Amino acid sequence: MDRLKDKIAVITGAASGIGLGTVELFVAEGARVLAADVQDERGRELERRFNGQVKFHHCDVTQEDDIKATMQAAHDQFGGLDIVFNNAGAGGSPNTIEDMTGEAWDRSMNLLLRSVALGIRYAVPFLKARGGGSIINTASVAALQAGAGPIAYSVAKAGVIHLTTVSAAQLGRAKIRVNAICPGLILTDIFAAGARAMGAPDAMLEQIKSGMTQMAPDAQPIPKGGLPADIARACLYLASDDSEFVTGTHIVVDGGMTTGPRHAWDPEEQQRRMAQRAAMQAAATQKT
């Protein structure tokens, strides 16, 4: 406990999912948190729940002025800024490269990459005033391989990783560390968000959530669904002094999803392949 005692943090996308899980953990570890989100009612409820330790600030991370105002609000509400978690985001455009439009591409980049760059930019003066600090950015396993997300989302998250590296190099002498986290399959509302945006009924949204919950333990070597708390704990490490010599890198928190193809870790798939090879060898023997 108290690993973040007397620290002041900004967390974007704080009202749900990974952001909410991180708010809860940071508060438990002694931090005061400026919770930024577009979900006003959820944000106000978060402020009421952690009376005095959390303040809510409306922030649309696609709007530069909102990001700037959020960093200023942390200073105004709590007196400074030590930690920034650039976390807000969504799935972005579902388009493939064949049907992508410039508008859809730009919208995804603004939400997922530009917002992180501006979050870093407007946090820096406040972090310098405190003698340094920690910036953490949410990337994704989709940044590391094809097939884990739509193309615009995947490219934006890859950009977040390189932005993290270059920013860390430029800010290290100011004692500002910059790192990223690459979540795997984490059970949040992101999977239902696209359907909700298209007006899907509540019953369909619940079906999506239920389906993801059921399949998540079978999606990677570690047989459990990823939870916001799994990411929050990695974020705590990067926010705390425990990682004071860690910067410019990304931590993969995916239950082993990126360790290799399914046959590398799934015994059933290994047995199926062995049976397939045995059948092929038997067929070849019969022919000779």
Image (cartoon, rainbow, N blue to C red):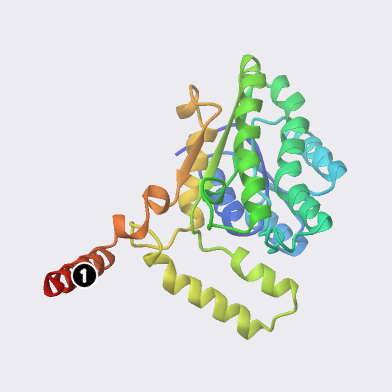
Q: Is residue 90 left or right of residue 77?
A: left
Q: Say which quadrant the C terminus sits in.
A: bottom left
Classify residue 141 as left or right of residue 109.
left
Can residue 30 be seen here? The reply is yes
Q: Is residue 62 left or right of residue 90?
A: right
Residue visible at 64% across and 40% down in the picture: 160
Q: How many discs mark residues in the rendered view?
A: 1
Which residue is the extreme one toward the right? 65
Identify residue for label 1. Answer: 280
**Quarter residue 247 falls in:** top right
Q: Position of residue 195 (x, y in %)?
A: 68, 74
Residue that lies at the very extreme toward the top in this rendered image: 173
Q: Decide: is 116 above or below 264.
A: above
Which of these two is toward me, 284 or 215?
284
For the question of whether residue 4 can be seen, the reply is: no
- Closer to us: 65 or 156: 156
Q: Is residue 279 above or below residue 163?
A: below
